[in-house]
Amino acid sequence: MLKYPAPGAPDLAKRTKELLEQAGFGPVSEDHGRGLDHGAWVPLMFMYPEANIPVCQLSVQTHRDGTYHYTLGKAPAPLRGEGVLVLGSGSATHNLGKMGRDDEPVPQWASDFNTWLRDSLLAGRYDDVNRYEEKAPHPSPEHFYPVHVALGAAGDEPKAELIHHSWAEANMSYASYHFTTKD
């Protein structure tokens, strides 16, 4: 069993909660008993294998949409100026019911969505990304909403850069984007 024993970040959690509530996302509840979701600790395990950085996790709201999550991400944007890394982790495409082997061809639906997302992000069509349900529906939005949060956290006039892309298990796109604020 894999473990990622990163220290918690209670002060950061408190600051994040304050920012969210100030932005109208309250009341914000806290869950001190739940550990990190695999969507948080798996990428961190590769980035910080010593698990020596404090981690605070924010949950997505599966009953909400992309625009909600983008706006949610804007609330903690000031944390970037305080040295906080905002990491949105999920999968650009992710359908457990249609997983295959790594050597299988990527299904057309996954390739099409991945291409649409890349083109939209790199061209700055963020409203399209926020309204993805109208443009390019996603089979597992709970795995896609973290990109909205990270995009919102980049602040006003974000700029997207594709920094990695690979496929796993036929339909899981590991497209990775870095969001910054335009100069």
Image (cartoon, helix red, strand yellow):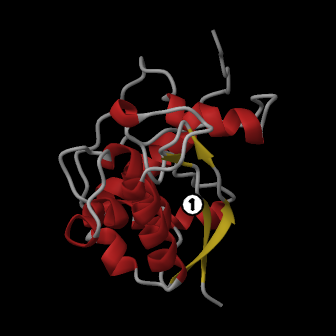
38 or 83, which lies in front?
38
In the rendered view, tell whether residue 172 sits above or below residue 146.
above
Please provide percent x and percent y for residue 11.
55, 40
Q: Is residue 63 left or right of residue 22?
A: left
163 or 97, which lies in front?
97
Please provide percent x and percent y for residue 160.
58, 75
Residue 99 seen in render = yes
Q: Residue at x 32, y 45 (%)?
A: 140
Query: Helix or strand or loop: what does disc 1 sit on?
Result: helix
Q: Residue at x 34, y 31 (%)?
A: 97
**Identity of the amino acid at label 1?**
Leu
Please provide percent x and percent y for residue 13.
49, 41
Q: Is residue 70 left or right of residue 62?
A: right
| Residue that sits furthest to the bottom in the current view | 183
Quadrant (top left, top right, bottom left, bottom right) of the N terminus: top right
Quadrant (top left, top right, bottom left, bottom right) of the C terminus: bottom right
> Neighbour class for label 1 at 10 Å: few (<14), some, many (≥20)?
some
Q: Residue at x 64, y 55 (%)?
A: 84
In the rendered view, tell whether residue 43 sits above or below residue 110.
above
101 or 73, which lies in front?
101
Q: Which residue is label 1 attached to? A: 79
